[in-house]
Image (spheres, coloured by chain):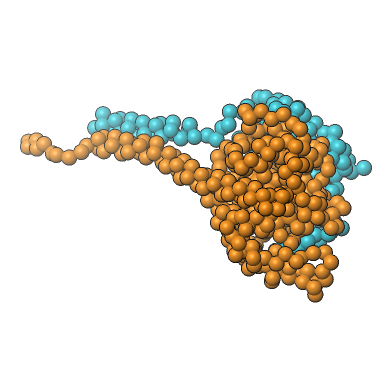
Chain colours: A orange, B cyan
């Protein structure tokens, strides 16, 4: 019998080593992923800050806040603040003559955001409107979707009696409209003096998620901010809510696909929640230029108070 | 031989236990005592084909709002995103579209006359009288029987 001592590892030793490595990787991987998301979020916050500053610079030059939209199709805040986002070239290519009085031959449709005279501006992707935490969607008509939406107040956009402007609903689900920093240019400009709640208690912009189109061409137009309905959020739905977004048509959203948020189509009120891909909440820029992280668990009274301009609510900073 | 087999077993089981323990801590819980909510919505005795339900806390200063899409009369809010126990106002909407919009091109303006109509009476949405009492520990299943007249 020749008992030769073999050199090498036993199976047990190998298994223990593999187990230790597995544990280490399992520990490390979430940390790495979290660090990546933290980096993306900080970029996202930075973009939001730039938008907030652009709105303030617009106000300095024009003594009013930028219009939320010019009716439904002739531009939104995303166009009007471009000169203050250092995108003057894009802004200069925008043709702002679109108006009601125009016939089709007079350029009514050509002057829309998707019309021939304006696609130079609207098809140019603006990096500062894009949050890296979200996934890019397929641009409809070459016009990209983005990740930041303006505050349209605490109710809804209504389709009732809106022949010449887009109007906020005066009541929605028992909530009374109490002013918003952004609305239709045909309803008049919002000045800072009309924000009686105070700029640090009023949100200007928050985040939204780009809707991903369905597998056979179904559109999801959330985040399509050159179009009026995609340009806003309303605080009657809480951040990242399970309450479905109410779109103008069921053909404009496609829920439960590639992480698309819940939505339904076709009622008289259009409502869109602010949403983000960040864990636990989303960022919002206030009128004073500060960016706050708002948790998903915020109660609806506080969320509404943050979005109104003249609700005269008492907001304690530990409520969100 | 038996001895080493057992050791291998232990090692493998230990690995599994450790890794599952590590992943168990990664739930998306936000610390709220959420409950899952589900139910059935009937309109004039027929399941509501499509629509939305929103559940808003009666005291809007506490709790979180929730909601779901109604499909073929059924709705469900999972526990992970559920509602905390308490009283809720219930809002049910369902729209009827006149004409589906043209797809594949950027949407144009919509005239008020072309916008969808609400088919649920106002006592179930704008001036809702529906309520739901979400309780802890019991299945929260709510049947809503709506009348269009």
Q: Farthest residue in the left direction?
A: A2
Quadrant in which the C terminus of chain A appears? top right
Which of these two is toward me, B12 or B124? B124
Which of these two is toward me, B145 or A251? A251
Residue A294, by quadrant, is top right
Q: Residue at x 77, y 71 (%)?
A: A107
Q: Residue at x 60, y 65 (%)?
A: A89
Q: Farthest residue in the bottom direction?
A: A105
Residue A234, by quadrant, is top right
Residue A93 appears in the rendering: yes
Q: How many marks?
A: 0
- Residue A102 in the image: above or below residue A85: below
Which of these two is toward me, A46 or A301? A46
- Is residue A59 left or right of B1 when viewed as pictured? right
Residue B78 screen position, x and y as percent: 64, 37
Q: Residue at x 67, y 49 (%)?
A: A60
Q: Residue at x 78, y 58 (%)?
A: A71
- Is residue A275 left or right of B91 when viewed as pictured? left
Residue B104 appears in the rendering: no
Residue A256 screen position, x and y as percent: 64, 49
Residue B118 screen position, x and y as percent: 84, 48
Which of these two is toward me, B6 or B82? B82
Quadrant in which the N terminus of chain A appears? top left
Residue A33 screen position, x and y as percent: 45, 43
């Amino acid at each position: 019998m020749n008992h030769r001592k073999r050199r090498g590892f036993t199976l047990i030793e190998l298994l223990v080593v593999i187990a230790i490595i597995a544990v280490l990787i399992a520990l490390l991987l979430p940390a790495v992923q979290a660090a990546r998301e933290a980096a993306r979020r900080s970029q996202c916050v930075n973009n939001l800050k730039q938008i907030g500053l652009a709105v303030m610079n617009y106000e300095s030059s024009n003594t009013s806040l930028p219009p939320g939209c010019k009716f439904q199709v002739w531009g939104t805040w995303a166009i009007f603040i471009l000169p203050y986002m250092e995108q003057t070239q894009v802004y200069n290519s925008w043709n702002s003559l679109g108006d009601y009085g125009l016939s089709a031959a007079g350029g009514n449709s050509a002057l829309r955001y998707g019309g021939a005279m304006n696609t130079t501006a609207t098809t140019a992707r603006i990096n500062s409107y894009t949050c890296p935490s979200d996934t890019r969607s397929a641009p409809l008509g070459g016009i990209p979707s983005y990740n930041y939406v303006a505050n349209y107040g605490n109710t809804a956009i209504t389709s009732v009696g809106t022949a010449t402007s887009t109007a906020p609903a005066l009541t929605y689900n028992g909530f009374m409209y109490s002013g918003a920093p952004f609305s239709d240019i045909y309803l008049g400009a919002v000045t800072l003096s009309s924000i009686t709640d105070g700029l640090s208690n009023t949100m200007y912009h928050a985040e939204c998620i780009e809707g991903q189109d369905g597998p056979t061409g179904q559109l999801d137009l959330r985040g399509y901010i050159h179009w009026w309905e995609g340009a806003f959020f309303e605080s009657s739905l809480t951040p990242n809510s399970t309450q479905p977004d109410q779109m103008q048509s069921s053909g404009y959203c496609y829920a439960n696909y590639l992480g698309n948020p819940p939505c339904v189509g076709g009622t008289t009120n259009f409502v869109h929640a602010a949403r983000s891909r960040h864990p636990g909440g989303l960022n919002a820029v206030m009128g004073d230029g500060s960016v706050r992280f708002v948790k998903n668990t915020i109660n609806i009274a506080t969320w509404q108070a943050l979005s109104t301009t003249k609700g005269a609510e008492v907001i304690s900073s530990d409520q969100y | 031989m038996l001895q080493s087999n057992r050791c291998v077993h232990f090692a493998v089981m230990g690995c599994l236990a450790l890794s599952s323990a590590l992943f168990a801590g990664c739930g998306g819980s936000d610390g709220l005592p959420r409950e899952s909510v589900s139910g059935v919505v009937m309109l004039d005795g027929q399941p509501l084909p499509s629509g939305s339900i929103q559940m808003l806390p009666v005291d809007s200063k506490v709790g979180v709002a929730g909601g779901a899409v109604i499909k073929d009369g059924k709705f469900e809010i999972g526990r992970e995103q559920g509602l905390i126990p308490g009283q809720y106002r219930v809002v049910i909407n369902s729209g009827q579209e006149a004409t589906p919009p043209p797809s594949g091109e950027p949407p144009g303006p919509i005239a008020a006359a072309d916008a969808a109509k609400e088919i649920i009476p106002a006592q179930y949405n704008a001036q809702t009288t529906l309520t739901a009492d979400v309780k802890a520990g019991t299945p929260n299943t709510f049947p809503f029987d709506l009348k269009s007249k």
